[in-house]
Image (tube, coloured by chain):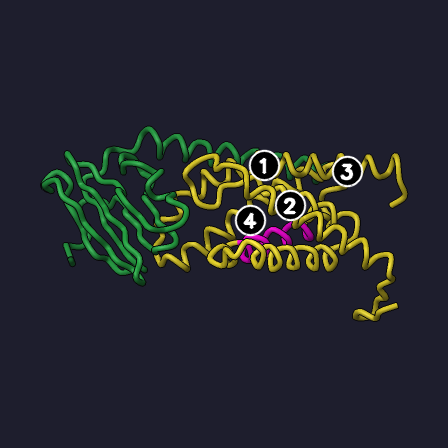
Chain colours: A yellow, B green
Amino acid sequence: MLRWGDKFLDIRKISRLGLLTALALIIFIVELRLPDIAPIAGMKLGLANIITVYAVYTYGGAEAALILYARILLGTLMTGNFSALIFSLSGGTLCLIGMILLKKAIDIKHMWLCSVFGAILHNIGQTAAAVAVMRTLAVISYLPFLMISGCIAGAFTGIAAQLIVSRINKYGKK
Amino acid sequence: MKKSRIALAAAAAVFVLSAAICIYMLFFKPKPQYVRITSGGKTLYTLDLTKEKDRLITVEYDGRKNVIEIKDGRIHMLEADCPDHVCIDTGWLDNGLPIVCMPNRLVIEAVGKGSDAAVG
């Protein structure tokens, strides 16, 4: 067993987290092949968020953070798109913090709602990064458009994560 | 249960508000007369589109190039050597949405009348 803070990580858990990270990476890379919906930078489905929401609810904030940052860093290395890194990091961090906090208020049956807020926060985070990078407030004009697509995509990924939870409860052990 | 109701209402409010702002920006913003072109936060040009002749403006940033076209009092990105071409796909600047080229840090935005004078 590995010590991590005052908790112990067993091998079973490490391999599960590794598996989830691999899944998130595959989803992330496959999603890049999908054509853009609108000519707005940063508008995407964010399917890898399925794994993040799932991890927040079934494992906890720290584990979800490990998966998220491993996915973002490895995904960036694999795609070579380093200019997108700052947007992924700022959006992902805000999204993660928000979902960890909201988990206390929103029970697992309303996971999709938590995912919607995660998506909204992700959009706010990436827009803030864009303002910092471009040094102009003009990019905020795109925030409402990102938020609409974020709400829809967030609900979709949240429902997908909820389906995964119910299937696993039904057919397999957690 | 009650907390998730509040959360649902909040999410719905954000969605409706964003939709309203989007519709306003797409359909109710007047056609821009004054536009500002900025690169990396620095203002390069402030133009009055009604007085501009048809021309091409080339902007370079960090060795990369963007070509902006002004035609019949409208402005758009004609060429960009960035990988995504989002700025070209945005089309003409006819509403409240600025044209943004993220990789080359270039922004073309509408500004209100009486804004700062031409720098370029």
Chain for mark 1?
A
Give the quadrant of residue B72: top left
Nearer-the-camera pick, A91 or A27:
A27
Residue, disc 1: A153
Amino acid found under the numbered disc labelled 3: Ile
Say whether marks 2 and 3 touch (CB < 8 Å). no
Judge if badges 2 and 3 mark residues of a common chain. yes
Instruction: For label 3, count other residues whose C-alpha is less than 10 Å away and answer few (under 14), some (14-19) or many (20+).
Output: some
Callout 3 secondary element: helix
Tell me where residue A120 appears, x and y as whole percent. 55, 44
Is there any visible trace of residue A10 in the rendered image?
Answer: yes
Tell me where residue B60 appears, x and y as whole percent. 26, 58
Amino acid found under the numbered disc labelled 2: Asn
Which residue lies at the image location 45% right of the left edge and 38% below the top edge?
A145
Say whether marks 2 and 1 touch (CB < 8 Å). yes
Amino acid found under the numbered disc labelled 4: His
Callout 4 secondary element: helix
Left or right: residue A98 versus residue B33 is right
Q: Earlier in the sequence, mark 4 or mark 3?
A: 4
Chain for mark 4?
A
Say whether marks 4 and 2 touch (CB < 8 Å). yes
Instruction: Say which of marks 4 and 3 sits in front.
Output: 3
Callout 2 secondary element: helix
Amino acid found under the numbered disc labelled 1: Ala
Instruction: For label 2, count other residues whose C-alpha is less than 10 Å away and answer few (under 14), some (14-19) or many (20+).
Output: many
Residue, disc 3: A164
Judge if badges 4 and 2 mark residues of a common chain. yes
Q: Is residue A34 magenta?
A: no
Relative vertical location of residue B96 with respect to residue B28 in this rendering, above or below? below
Residue, disc 4: A122
Say whether marks 4 and 3 touch (CB < 8 Å). no
Q: CA distance from mark 4 to mark 2?
A: 10 Å
